[in-house]
Image (tube, helix red, strand yellow):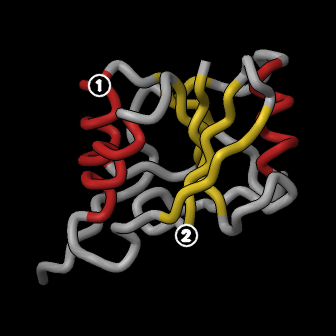
Amino acid sequence: MKVVIQAKEKRAEAIIDERFGRCGFFAVYDTDKKDFEFFENPFKDGGGAGIKAAQLVADKGEALIGVNFGPNAFAVLSESGMKVYSGLREKTLKENIDIFLEQKLEEIKDSNAEKHSGLM
């Protein structure tokens, strides 16, 4: 299984990034190989970051660990069939993965952040 997690830095010891569409990086943890692969979030600085990031990560894994998800991004994730889990703030990527593998992270069933838009 491949699990995507929001990352502030490209290392397993980095703290989870609380932002979804604007996080710096995504990490993909392969449960078979027991290793991380990192890639930069190309949408962190533009409009529609949440939706675009959701489309990107939906193609990278079967589950997502994160903290905050707006309604548009969460809708894309849900429609893709990806399961979304509530990551633990102030824990490293590795710690969050270990807790996920112990089946101790709560599955998120709906968005938990307000819609963000550049429109006023």
Estimate the x, y position of residue 9 in percent, counting from the top left. 70, 68
Q: Quadrant of residue 28?
A: top right
The residue located at (26%, 36%) in the rendering is 75
Q: In the depicted view, which residue is nearer to us: 95 or 33?
A: 33
Q: Is residue 59 left or right of residue 39?
A: left
Kind of residue indicated by mark 2 = Gly
Dot 2 crowding, Cα within 10 Å, few <14, some 14–19, many 20+: many
Seen from this angle, which residue lies furthest bottom?
Answer: 120
Q: Is residue 95 above or below residue 62?
A: below
Q: Is residue 7 above or below residue 54?
A: below
Please identify the quadrant where the C terminus is shown.
bottom left
Residue 15's disc number: none
Among the two numbered marks 1 and 2 on one chain, the one whose residue lies closer to the N terminus: 2
Q: Is residue 74 left or right of residue 61?
A: left
Estimate the x, y position of residue 17 in percent, counting from the top left. 64, 61
> Residue tagged by mark 1?
80
Secondary structure beneath dot 2 equals loop
Q: Is residue 95 left or right of residue 64?
A: right
The residue located at (52%, 65%) in the rendering is 23
Q: Are marks 1 and 2 in contact (CB under 8 Å)?
A: no
The residue located at (45%, 35%) in the rendering is 60
The residue located at (75%, 54%) in the rendering is 89
Secondary structure beneath dot 1 equals helix
> Residue tagged by mark 2?
24
As measured in the structure, the alpha-carbon distance from the residue carrying label 1 to the one carrying label 2 is 22 Å
Estimate the x, y position of residue 40 in percent, counting from the top left. 51, 64
Seen from this angle, which residue lies furthest front?
Answer: 33
Q: Quadrant of residue 74?
A: top left
Q: Quadrant of residue 111?
A: top left
Kind of residue indicated by mark 1 = Ser
